[in-house]
Every structure is written in structure tokens, then in C-alpha cells.
């Protein structure tokens, strides 16, 4: 199957999954800036490049290149793409949001959503993933880069929720807002924070104790969870 036909098949999967998860409203094929570029390549058994994202179905991971965008300050996002809320995001990720979402769908993950507005106290729903920061050949949990100010400690380690953003009037929200991973609940993000403080915007800041200087290149590695952990158990 050629690249364009393969991308089209994935894109149909993307639309169906978004509609089935309840996160879609007035779905139509996105126009203009929310149409995914035709960039997909099979590079090995179970391995694909989707734009700048590397999908490895064998290991159940999706990896994306990123750079440190903030070394200190209050945050509402772990990561966004260029043009997003860079003034409150630890990482700037070199990936199209729709490519990230497609990669997670191809890992067999299902989004649900549930958050209606930014700062909504509703817990987002969807399949869970672990997120790592890879630098100099070493992986560290992404929560270690986030400082929980009320607790005076790093953010509690937790699986993140694949909420999957949503469509409104034919536009994919994450592609428009460039929002990828949030510490504060956001209806347009792709991966959201399930912890109780996820509705607050003044809880988290960059953990400057471990975050390297602005401009440092890293890789964000998203690991699909095959089994749901017991209630209250950390991964």
C-alpha cells in the first residue's frame, strides 16, 4: 500500500475513533491547517515514521523529538508544538499534533475525553500511557520534571490519560491549539493529567532541579499500558 493510501486508512481510523470516544462534535474532514501532511513511512517490522514521530508497535512506544522550552516558572503544559502555549510549557515538541494522535491510535489506545473546558475539575477519561524523557541514553519519568508546589515535591508519578482532543466544526482542536500534554485539564489536549489537582492552574512549575538548560534536545517516549493498574496503584 502506498504512503498516501496508508495515511488515508489511518486517518479514517482517527475519525472513527474520535467519534466513538464521544470527543467529536460536527465531525467533517478538517480543512486547511488541520489536514495532516502526507508524511508516513514504514522503516521496519512494526516501525513507522509518522511525520517526525517514531511509532514502534513491537515495544508499544511512540517517540517524538523535543527541546527544553522552560527551565523555571509556572506551567499548565508539559509539551506543545511550535505555535502553542510556549510561555507555560516545559517542552516544545517537533511533531504535528495530528501525527501524535494517529500514532497513539495505532498503538491500539482509545481516547474518551470528558473535559469540557480548561480547568474543568472532571477527571479526563481514556486509555493510559507512561511518559518518559530520554536524554543522553537515559530515560526518566516526565513527572520528575514537574514540581508540585503545594507538596514541595516532584509531581506524583501517574499514568497519563489519552483524552484525544476533539473536533469542533470539522477542526481538530489539538492541531489548532498545538496542545499535546497538559498538567491542567484541557479539552483540546491529546494527553491529560488524571491527578486530583489537574483542574488547578497554579499547582505545578518546572522542576529546575532536574530540568536542563533551555534549548537542550531530548526525546519524549510515550509507552502504551497494556493492562490497567489496580485502583490507587502508581506505575
Image (cartoon, rainbow, N blue to C red):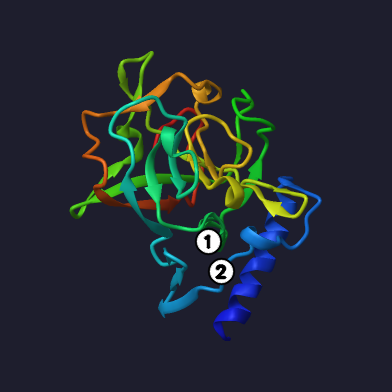
Image quadrant containing the N terminus = bottom right
Answer with left or right where residue 222 lies relative to residue 120.
left
Q: Position of residue 83 (x, y in %)?
A: 49, 47
Find the residue positioned furthest to the left: 136
Q: Quadrant of residue 141?
A: top left
Q: Position of residue 2 (x, y in %)?
A: 57, 86
What is the crowding at mark 1: few (fewer than 14 residues within 10 Å), some, or many (at least 20)?
many
Count of numbered circles on the image: 2
Image quadrant containing the C terminus = top left
Q: Nearer the viewer, residue 16 or 89?
A: 89
Q: Which residue is mark 2?
A: 37
> What residue do we see at 39% from left, 24% from top?
74
Find the residue positioned furthest to the bottom: 1
Q: Which residue is mark 1?
A: 99
> What residue do we see at 46% from left, 77% from top?
41
Find the residue positioned furthest to the right: 26
Q: Position of residue 204 (x, y in %)?
A: 40, 24
> What residue do we see at 61% from left, 23% from top?
121
User: Marks 1 and 2: which is nearer the front?
Assistant: 2
Q: Quadrant of residue 47?
A: bottom left
Answer with left or right where residue 230 lies relative to residue 166.
left
For the residue labelled by badge 2, is the local secondary structure a helix, a strand or a loop? Answer: loop
Q: Position of residue 65 (x, y in %)?
A: 35, 57
- Image mark for residue 30: none
State how far apart marks 1 and 2 are (Cα): 9 Å
Mark 1 or mark 2, earlier in chain: 2
> What residue do we see at 38% from left, 27% from top?
156
Q: Is residue 138 above or below residue 99?
A: above
What is the crowding at mark 2: few (fewer than 14 residues within 10 Å), some, or many (at least 20)?
some
Amino acid at each position: 500500500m502506498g504512503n498516501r493510501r496508508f495515511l488515508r486508512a489511518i486517518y479514517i481510523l482517527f475519525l472513527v475513533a474520535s467519534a466513538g470516544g464521544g470527543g467529536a462534535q460536527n465531525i467533517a474532514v478538517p480543512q486547511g491547517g488541520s489536514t495532516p501532511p502526507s508524511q508516513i513511512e514504514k522503516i521496519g517490522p512494526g516501525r513507522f515514521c509518522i511525520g517526525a514521530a517514531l511509532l514502534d508497535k513491537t515495544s508499544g512506544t511512540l517517540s517524538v523529538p523535543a527541546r527544553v522550552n522552560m527551565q523555571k516558572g509556572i506551567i499548565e503544559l508539559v509539551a506543545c508544538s511550535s505555535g502553542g502555549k510556549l510561555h507555560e510549557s516545559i517542552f516544545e515538541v517537533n511533531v504535528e499534533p495530528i501525527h501524535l494522535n494517529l500514532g497513539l491510535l495505532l498503538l491500539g489506545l482509545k481516547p474518551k475525553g470528558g473535559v469540557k473546558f480548561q480547568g474543568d475539575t472532571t477527571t479526563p477519561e481514556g486509555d493510559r500511557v507512561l511518559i518518559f524523557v530520554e536524554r543522553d541514553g537515559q530515560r526518566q519519568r516526565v513527572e520528575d520534571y514537574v514540581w508540585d508546589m503545594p507538596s514541595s515535591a516532584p509531581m506524583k508519578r501517574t499514568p497519563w490519560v489519552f483524552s484525544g482532543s476533539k473536533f469542533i466544526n470539522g477542526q481538530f482542536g489539538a492541531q489548532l491549539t498545538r496542545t499535546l500534554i497538559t498538567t491542567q485539564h484541557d479539552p483540546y489536549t491529546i494527553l491529560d493529567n488524571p491527578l486530583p489537582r489537574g483542574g488547578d492552574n497554579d499547582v505545578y512549575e518546572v522542576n529546575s532541579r532536574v530540568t536542563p538548560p533551555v534549548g537542550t534536545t531530548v526525546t519524549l517516549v510515550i509507552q502504551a499500558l497494556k493492562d490497567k493498574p489496580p485502583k490507587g496503584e502508581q506505575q
